[in-house]
Amino acid sequence: MSSIHLLPDHLISQIAAGEVVERPASALKELLENSLDAGADDVSVMLLQGGVKQLRVTDNGGGIAPDELTLALTRHATSKIASLEDLERVASLGFRGEALASIASVSRTSITSRIKRERHAWRISSEGGHLTPNEPAALDVGTVIEVNDLYYNTPARRKFLKTEGTEYGHCEEAFKRIALSRPQAGFMLQHNGRAQWRLAAGEPQKRFGAVLGEEFAEQAFLIDESAAGLRLWGMAAKPAYSKLSRDAQYFYVNGRFIRDKLVAHAVRQAYQDVLHHERHPAFVLFFELDPALVDVNVHPTKTEVRFRDGQAVHRFIFHALHKALAGPAGSQVAAPEPVAQAMPFQPTYPTYQPQIPLRAGEGLDFYRMMFGERPVSSAMITEEMPPQPVQDYPLGFALGQLHGVYVLSQNAQGLVVVDMHAAHERIMYERLKHALESQNIATQPLLLPVSFHADRLEVATAEEQVGVLHNLGFEIAVLSPTTLAVRAVPSMLKDADVVALARAVLSDIREFGGSRALTERRNEMLATMACHAAVRANRTLTITEMNALLRDMESTERSDQCNHGRPTWFQVTMAELDKMFMRGK
Amino acid sequence: MNIKIDRDMLLKPLSAVSSIVERRHTLPILSNLLLEAKQDRVTLTATDLEMQISLSLDGAPGGEVSTTVSARKLLDICRSLPDQAEITMAIQDNRMQIRAGKSRFNLQTLPAADYPLMAKAGGETGLVLQIAQRTLKKLLKQVEYAMAQQDIRYYLNGLLFEVNGNRLNVVGTDGHRLSFTSTELSQSYEKQEMILPRKTVLELIKLLEDSDEMLTIEVGSNQVNFAFSGIRLISKVIDGKFPDYTRVIPVGHQNSLAVDRQTLLLAMQRASILSNEKYRGIRMVLGKDSLRLISSNSEQEEAEEELEVNYNGDPLDIGFNVTYMIDVLNNVDNDVVTFSFADANSSCLVTVPSDSNYKYVVMPMRI
């Protein structure tokens, strides 16, 4: 048996590097974070061969003093925190003092840096953790870190690297995450000598659009909610702009990108009602709170965090997003972009084209002969034209019905096409929900309580959260350390699978402090009721009915989407129509 | 190979056996019924693999036939033929030709040997009961509506038949309410239980007649046979443990209220119009000699019914699912119904003065 001995320093660094520097992208993330922590507002990144051959980050930050250069490459050396108190309220991105040392231990690294008061810059190089002394160099204030031949001395790790394209993709993703979080800083990314991204410092909104695409910026709405020291701001896409994968989801806690179960759940729930369950929302959200209330020292890569009061955070994020998503139809219409030509409508006189009252009997008879008796035709003729100008109503006024499925309407921007079943379904659904929410939850005690085998966590939750369960309409008794019995269920769900329901509720309460499982089940039922109650295709509507539907949509929450997350209406602007007909060219 | 039979004679048994044939399934032969003729006697058999009904009728002269043919088509043909038409069935080359007057139908058949007949229970069965058709029908109708429907607790989707001494107890429950009834048997037996599936119960009610003719029940280990007036019904039983119903039936409820069934039923039906359409809550408010029924829905509409009753118990305000109450009021055959309460959180017992064996227990709802 070999004796116990201390490991050499560079070996410890290499072991740590296994966690921190998983691939070039993670090294890039660490270097970018260092630049931002140094106060840089212009950062450029140059990559060669996906960052494996070379990874160079140049910034105009504060720089490193020459006598600290050696220290910078030493493990557990940092300028960011000094004491335990600092650690408890970390405001900088990094704090462990590990990244540079780890990177240096598995690559050929050089740091060139100049601080303001020095006359010239100094450079330090390291090869696998072995330092060469400082030497003078030429540089403006700031730092250049060059990481060459990553993993040259750990072939095992090198084998795990993917193709150049994949590694570059990861680097680009890391770059995008950082770039999104700091709109006030300029960023540049070059790969194999070609510029890939050039992001000028500017407004957050502009940055989001530049990174995630203009389509996202057009389809997203702004959020800014704060309460009790918590603030959530950013942009979230409307449900219609959803994705099949989770890749367009950027959540930052105090400026740090994270992927957190609690946060994901809160966001998911907020979108629950308006998004198809297989699709994922797209968003860039920034969550700010007192650094003391969040523990970022959970994992070396810091993509996980722990909140002191997870339940409050969950509730806040859910409510902020939920509220933002609940706007009625038309309210989220992006401000119409200034179109070059004048708007086709003048707002001062009634912009609605009144129909000519066809009084000639022959004309009517002719139409009757051609189309049979149609209630629509007569209704359209006698219709009184609404006196209000169109722009008071975002969805405008109905023109007629298309194949019994779509309602066509005219608003200030042009043509609005409404899927009448989907829209009516949503209106009914919101009404049913609203009616129920104002009532107490009726409880149905069971004649035959249902007992089931439960694990310790479930039993503990049932014991602790009697009050919460009671408010939800549940009564769960503990029979033995491993058996629970459901004695009462909410009356609305009396025919559901009691055990599955109870399990879902207990696990929700345990994880997130409250349960929306019941609300969700109830809503599913209401959605079915709403679907049956809504007008079906081929039901002929009169103009009055259509206008009533449009007005209802404008005053109903979430009516931009049907209950399954599909859009209920869309706009064809006059500009688009003009383009189709090549007018004004 | 011909059978001659009167249309009117065939129609009723045919529709009786066809009713258990499922409309949609993956096994084509299950949509057929088995038709066997031997020495002037025709036997029709249908099955859904859970239960099987056979019905024999005499007076159909013809040869020996054994085949299967689509139950639905045969029934539709018979039904649409004129009254008193004489039907001739002939089998040739896997096809059945049906002639009546100037009508002619050729139906596809499948071989009788492939028909999945349920074997009759083996000899080890212990229990053979005799009971009048009228009695069994009454018992079933008294409790049938409390059975669960497609509950995941599969043992609730049926009726418990419990023989204990010289009593036969029949119980149905869906976990929210329970109905119990009982009758006396001519002899004593050892204690034995079985759960009869929902579908079998409903079929039996249709097939049983209001006659004093005796019916034989043979209980096997996993199936039960009913034999009565030319009909033989074999059904699987539900394998499971029925909940202990005796613990659920309350005793000693002090506050009791006797009320005219028809009056209360109509009042309940009126009040239910404005109860919440999803959970159907209704409040019964009892005071000295008065009963008020109050309901309200999610649109804040309200209904109130007031009844004059004889009541001397404690004042009480108790909620119920009105469907459960309407069910019992619809199904008991007595003019007066008695409700017994303890308090607003305990179950309510419904009984009828004329039949002390009948009990209905329903849980209140907290509205």
Image (spheres, helix red, strand yellow):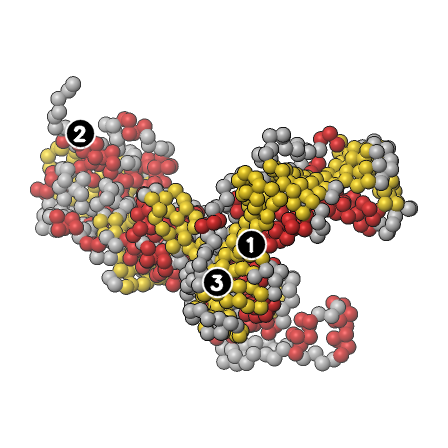
Identify the chain of the residue marked 1, using the numbered disc in the image: B
Between B331 and A48, the one lying in front of the other is: B331
Query: What distance separates the C-alpha of mark 2 from that of mark 1?
Result: 86 Å
Q: Amino acid at mark 2?
A: Leu
Q: Residue at x 36, y 44 (%)?
A: A483
Between A99 and A375, the one lying in front of the other is: A375
**Residue furthest to the right:** B102
Badge 1: how crowded within 10 Å, few (<14), some, or many (20+)? some
Q: Position of residue B284 (x, y in %)?
A: 48, 68
Q: Residue at x 29, y 33 (%)?
A: A53
Mark 2 near mark 3, Cβ–Cβ under 8 Å?
Answer: no
**Circle 2 SS class:** helix
**Circle 1 SS class:** strand
Of the two numbered discs 1 and 3 on the same chain, state the one appearing first in sequence. 3
Instruction: Answer whether residue B188 is visible to the viewer in this image.
Output: yes
- Residue A224's label in the rendered image is none
Q: Amino acid at mark 3?
A: Ser
State which quadrant residue B21 falls in. Answer: top right
Mark 1 near mark 3, Cβ–Cβ under 8 Å?
Answer: no
Labels in figure, total: 3
User: According to the image, label 3 marks what residue?
Assistant: B340
Badge 3: how crowded within 10 Å, few (<14), some, or many (20+)? many
Q: Position of residue B363 (x, y in %)?
A: 47, 58
Identify the chain of the residue marked 2, using the numbered disc in the image: A
Query: What distance separates the C-alpha of mark 2 from that of mark 3?
Result: 82 Å
Q: In the drawing, does residue A412 fall left or right of residue A437?
A: right
User: According to the image, label 1 marks what residue?
Assistant: B357
User: According to the image, label 2 marks what residue?
Assistant: A11
Q: Residue at x 55, y 72 (%)?
A: A548
Query: What distance separates the C-alpha of mark 1 from that of mark 3?
Result: 16 Å
Q: In the drawing, does residue B164 fall left or right of residue A377?
A: left
